[in-house]
């Protein structure tokens, strides 16, 4: 796919919008290679919408409760996204499972940040599940969104050590601050630069097919193909 500079980015949220803020900040600094053209939430009056408005970004709320079916919600959501003509659609704490038709419409442009070391802990309550399993490591992953929930190719992943005194809350906060807020701008920058793409359901970074996700922090000694 040819890409525009700066790339057009739409962000989907449902809540607080800390990942959205990290993308806004990177974009404002000129570090993202993308301009955020619209932020869409399925919940009204959430903090993430206020963050977007404060940055002068167009916002829209599409409340899923106003639709009879997931298909109808996704059709409306899809139309609102398509109207912004995005190159990249980033799910950032977006909490609605998307239908196959929606995924097909935007296939290859959809990224998600998920708070676990995928393939561990798809779905919800990831921090609790990592604690219950007494995992030594936990973290967050960026993946292409496909029909399979949290099952698309993982492109970038960052980990932290789980501490004995960690609770669900402390773990969630450290994953957010030490991993999520750093890795999402990096992955979007790859997409915006045309370096990261989905081909035949596989993720490619430059000329390398990613057999395993790139690990954060990015290794300066690694081949150029995996550096930002
Ligand atoms: N849709 C598809 N098709 N594929 C993915 O990989 C998706 C997706 C939609 C969202 C984000 C995901 C996450 O990062 C995501 C990935 C919501 C749920 C969920 O169970 C699960 C995973 C994710 C997001 N949502 C409930 C639902 O019925 C509602 C929960 C709520 O509103 O609080 O949609 O974790
Ligand atoms: C983040 O931890 C994100 O990874 C997670 O929700 C939080 C959103 O925070 N996403 C999911 O759990 C998706 N099901 P934010 O709104 O402050 O970025």
Image: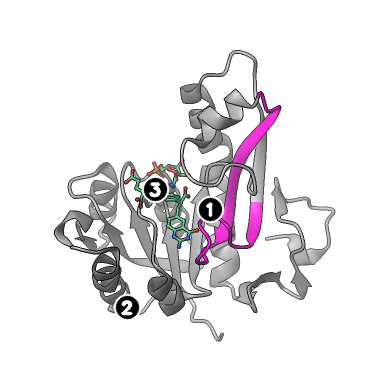
> Quadrant location of residue 227?
bottom right
Visible residue check, residue 57:
yes
Name the residue nearer the viewer: 29 or 224. Answer: 224
Q: Is residue 56 above or below residue 109?
A: above
Mark toward the start of the polypeptide (2 vs 3): 3
Q: Which residue is mark 3?
A: 21
> Quadrant location of residue 151?
bottom right
Name the residue nearer the viewer: 87 or 94. Answer: 94
Q: Residue at x 31, y 76 (%)?
A: 84
Q: Is residue 182 above or below residue 225?
A: above
Mark toward the start of the polypeptide (2 vs 1): 2
Asked whether mark 3 and ligand 2 are closer than 8 Å, the reply comes as yes
* Residue interval drawn in magenta: 134-156
Residue 151, magenta (yes or no): yes
Residue 38, magenta (yes or no): no
Left or right: residue 123 compared with residue 225: left
Q: CA distance from mark 3 to mark 1?
A: 11 Å
Q: Which residue is mark 2?
A: 82
């Amino acid at each position: 796919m040819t890409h525009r500079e700066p790339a057009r980015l739409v962000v989907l949220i449902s809540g607080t919008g800390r990942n959205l803020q990290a993308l806004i900040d990177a974009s404002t600094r000129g570090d993202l290679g993308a301009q955020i053209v619209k932020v869409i939430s399925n919940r009204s009056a959430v903090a993430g919408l206020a963050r977007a408005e404060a940055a002068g970004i167009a916002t829209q709320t599409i409340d899923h409760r106003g639709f009879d079916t997931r298909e109808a919600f996704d059709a409306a959501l899809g139309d609102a996204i398509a109207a912004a003509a995005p190159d990249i659609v980033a799910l950032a704490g977006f909490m609605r499972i998307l239908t196959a038709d929606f995924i097909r419409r935007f296939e290859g442009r959809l990224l998600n940040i998920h708070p676990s070391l995928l393939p561990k802990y798809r779905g919800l309550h990831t921090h609790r599940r990592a604690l219950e399993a007494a995992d030594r490591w936990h973290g967050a992953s960026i993946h292409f969104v496909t029909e399979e929930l949290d099952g698309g190719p993982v492109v970038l992943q960052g980990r932290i050590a789980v501490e004995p005194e960690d609770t669900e809350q402390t773990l969630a906060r450290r994953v957010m601050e030490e991993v999520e807020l750093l890795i999402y701008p990096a992955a979007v920058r790859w997409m915006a630069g045309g370096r990261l793409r989905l081909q035949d359901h596989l993720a490619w970074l430059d000329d390398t097919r990613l057999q395993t996700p790139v690990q954060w922090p990015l290794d300066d000694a690694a081949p150029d193909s995996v550096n930002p």
